[in-house]
Image (cartoon, helix red, strand yellow):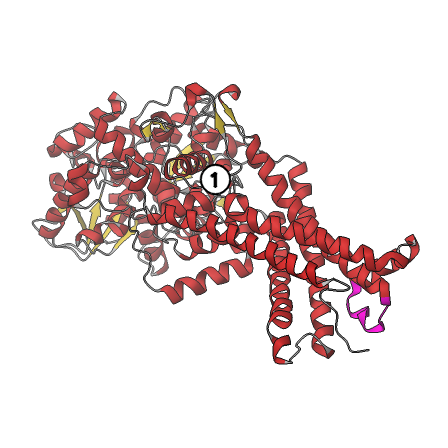
Amino acid sequence: MIETREIYRHFPFVLEIIFYVVAFSTIGFFIYGFYRKYQKYRKGREAGRFNNLAGRFLKAAAIMAKNSTVFKRDAYAGFAHWMIFWGFVVLFIGTVIVAFDYDFLRHLNLKLLQGNFYLGFSFVLDIFGVLFLVGLVMMMTRRAGKPAQLDYTRNDLAPGQYNRKGYATDDKIFLWLLFLIGLTGFFIEGIRIAADRPAFEVWSPVGWSLAGLSDMAGLTPHANSAHIYMWWFHAILVMFFIAYIPYSKAMHMLVDYANLMFKDDMAAKRLPRVSEERMKEGMGYKAVVDFTWKELLDFDACTKCGRCHQVCPARNAGTPLSPRDLILDLRTHANATIGAPEWFTQAFSPDKKQSGKLAGEIIQKDVLWSCTTCMACVEVCPVGIEHLTSIVNLRRSLVDQGAMETSLQDTLANIGEYGNSFGQSEKKRADWTKGLSFKVKDVRKEEAEYLWFVGDYASYDTRIQGLSRRVATVLQSAGIDFGILYEAEKNAGNDVRRVGEEGLYEMLVEDNMKALGKGKFKRIFTTDPHSYNTIKNEYPEYGGNYQIEHYTGLLLRLVKNGQLKFSKKLGYKVTYHDPCYLGRYNGEVDAPRQLLEAMGVELMDMPRCRENSFCCGAGGGRIWMDDSKMKERPSEIRIREALSLGGQVTHFIVACPKDYAMFSDAVKTSGNEGRMKVMDIIELAGEAMG
């Protein structure tokens, strides 16, 4: 016998015709649904993501091939998804080869699926078919365990105000459809082999085994008729799945690659600038068409995996924000507004119906103001969703409406009038230097190698001024030539921008760049990760290209070249908190740890550390807002996490002025003053220097 197989085994010609009619109708239905989605994306504003298309394509391909973003911090889900992904891809390619061979090559008197190629083809498809089914079973088992991240309960609404049964139904349909398609494919193979038992079909190990079971069950004499029924059952499942894709969770199979391909690696680190034309129309997003096409794509890319929901400090603190729910609400609203079809969605009670203003009603203002802009949601998302840009643009709309807390409004007014969030005279910005035994240079008047951009908290907060003096003393002892801008320095604007006050941010950038332009220095360092982020990543868009580093990087370099010597090994057992704007935003996680090692301390990292660090709760202007309604402040959650390491860890080390303020308060309010001492790295450095 020739090593091959008959595609339409014992099919009357009319059944073949019926199959092609059904198949082309299904494909037409799929194309229509996909076109409606495409039309939705076309209504979004330009996003500027078509540069370096080849590089973007290859990068996304590498991510998808490795499933690297799914593996991140969840190896079980990553491995299961890897098997499903590659099983699906190989089976799909196999189906395409079968169609090409039968529908095209056959008419040229050519045949691909025969001989050794057919045998190898059969073996490979069986192996990947098994991987596909095993991955699906793993995912089903995981869902049966009801992990917290897959719970669709909302933070912001009471149970009777919404209904998400559609989401749960969609999840089940998606998994079971894929599983049944894979399973029935094997059954077809087994019944076909059982009918004739060609010896070469041993290269289809799963089908061969199922043929044996067919023999044992006494079904083999009816194999030919059973094959037709099973073939059609499988075909109907496949046709339904194809039709189902654009209207369901399955859509993510198509858009996730595009979303990863067009992801901006600087998303959140560098927020989108508002054009003068847009400023005239009003700040922020007021309607669905204000979103970019990439943001509309984000909404459809969401798989509801709950990773962002799980890591969000605002949600953990009991605020109404869930990044997942925000994206899903925007998807629901966008589909309803633009008319894109969605079969399985959420429903709301009449008093919570999705209508009205985008920022303030569709997405409640308390939801938007809860965000700490820590970027944990963006960093953990496996499909490249850029939650933070949507949140900030909606905040801009709230700022435009004046819909904010009085404390925040007062702080922004202080920054606008005095250039700092404390509402203090700019002439007092350098008062912290008065306790020093030496004069800190004014780089406007005399040249220095380094400009220290000090920041508001390190300049004005009485709890932190001592730390600033310690930094100055350590650098002076190491022979570092540095100076400051004195009263010419203003708030760098990082959190002002993330609050949504874009106009004030641009004014601060202009003023700071004017002051920096008058300074005589080569490089900048700062003790404030918030200032570090915006000067490094956002000022260049305004023409401010500066060499800037965080002070931990500077200190480490001084240690390595021998300018800074630690004469004393401290011997403390400590844990270190990675600031969001230093670690997650800018990838600097090693310098602080290497410094601690050089000081002779024993470091025990918390479970959430480095890029996965848990936010203190200060970012995005939250430090200027009321947090009394939180069930537990993020800073208190973090202290509790540090205490869980055991009593041997007595020092909580920070490298950010705002972290020092937040965690010092948290130790007191949580009643742990005697158990945990908050210290800045610079305090340890001074002590280690003797």
Q: Residue furthest front?
A: 14
Label 1 crowding class (10 Å Cα cut-off): few <14, some 14-19, many 20+?
Answer: many
**Quadrant location of the C terminus in the rendered image:** top left
Identify which residue, 642 or 327, lies in the foreground. 327
**Quadrant location of the N terminus in the rendered image:** bottom right
Q: Position of residue 71 (x, y in %)?
A: 56, 52
Instruction: Judge whether residue 10 can be spotted in this image.
Output: yes
Tell me the magenta residue range. Answer: 196-205
Magenta span includes 676: no
> Which SS does the magenta portion mostly show?
helix
SS type, badge 1: helix
Q: Please name the residue shown 66% across and 76% down the image.
A: 112
Q: Which residue is mark 1?
A: 308
Q: Residue furthest left?
A: 445
Q: Please name the residue shown 92% across and 54% down the image.
A: 218
Identify which residue, 580 or 350, lies in the foreground. 350
Amino acid type assigned to the residue bearing label 1 in the image: Cys
